[in-house]
Amino acid sequence: MNLPSNTPPDGDFVAYVERLTHANAHASAEAREDRLKPGEKAAPRTSPTASIAKPSAQSAKPAPVAATVAAFATHVKWVVILWIATQVLSEVVPGTGFLFLPALLVYGAWAVWQANRRSSGALLQRLRELARQAAEEAEKAQKNQPSKKK
């Protein structure tokens, strides 16, 4: 019994891995762009190496999910470091433990600004669209409520 192999026939594993890595990075960038587009359902895109790289059903998480988990873990790490730093500072200078909340708000604002900058303003545009839709739905719900008369 001869099992098919998905390794390169010429044995150039370095070029093979680079092609796969480049294709996965390109596909995850396209997935990020598609997620930020409001209301459009794009057809699934296939990478040029889709026939070369066929991951098994038991493989690791998809690249966008893994990247999201890693980004979240990074933010949690920095929040914990910020909390530890403010607690150590409160041991040296009494009454400064409350600085964690303003520092946390500043860090949150910075993280949102970074996310918006990386998405070329698409994040802010999507948030504005969602806010507009929520306002329209609230207005419709308010019009549909019966008025109370005494």
Image (cartoon, rainbow, N blue to C red):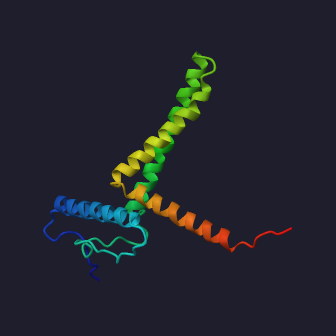
Total count of labels: 0
Q: Looking at the picture, does residue 103 appear above or below residue 55?
A: above
- Residue 33 located left or right of residue 23: right
- Residue 30 located left or right of residue 80: left
- Residue 2 located left or right of residue 64: left
Residue furthest right as drawn? 150
Q: x, y percentage for residue 105?
A: 53, 39
* Residue at screen point 31% across, 73% down: 54
* Residue at screen point 23% across, 61% down: 22
In terms of image quadrants, where is residue 143? bottom right
- Residue 123 located left or right of residue 4: right
Q: x, y percentage for residue 12?
A: 15, 63
Q: Nearer the viewer, residue 17 or 138?
A: 138
Q: Nearer the viewer, residue 25 or 30?
A: 30
Residue furthest bottom as drawn? 1
Q: x, y percentage for residue 56?
A: 38, 72
Q: Nearer the viewer, residue 120 or 21?
A: 120
In terms of image quadrants, where is residue 23? bottom left
Residue furthest left as drawn? 10
In terms of image quadrants, where is residue 120? bottom left
> Considering the image in quadrants, where does the N terminus appear?
bottom left
Residue furthest front as drawn? 150
* Residue at screen point 34% across, 76% down: 44
> Considering the image in quadrants, where does the C terminus appear?
bottom right
Q: Nearer the viewer, residue 99 or 18?
A: 99
Q: x, y percentage for residue 81?
A: 50, 34
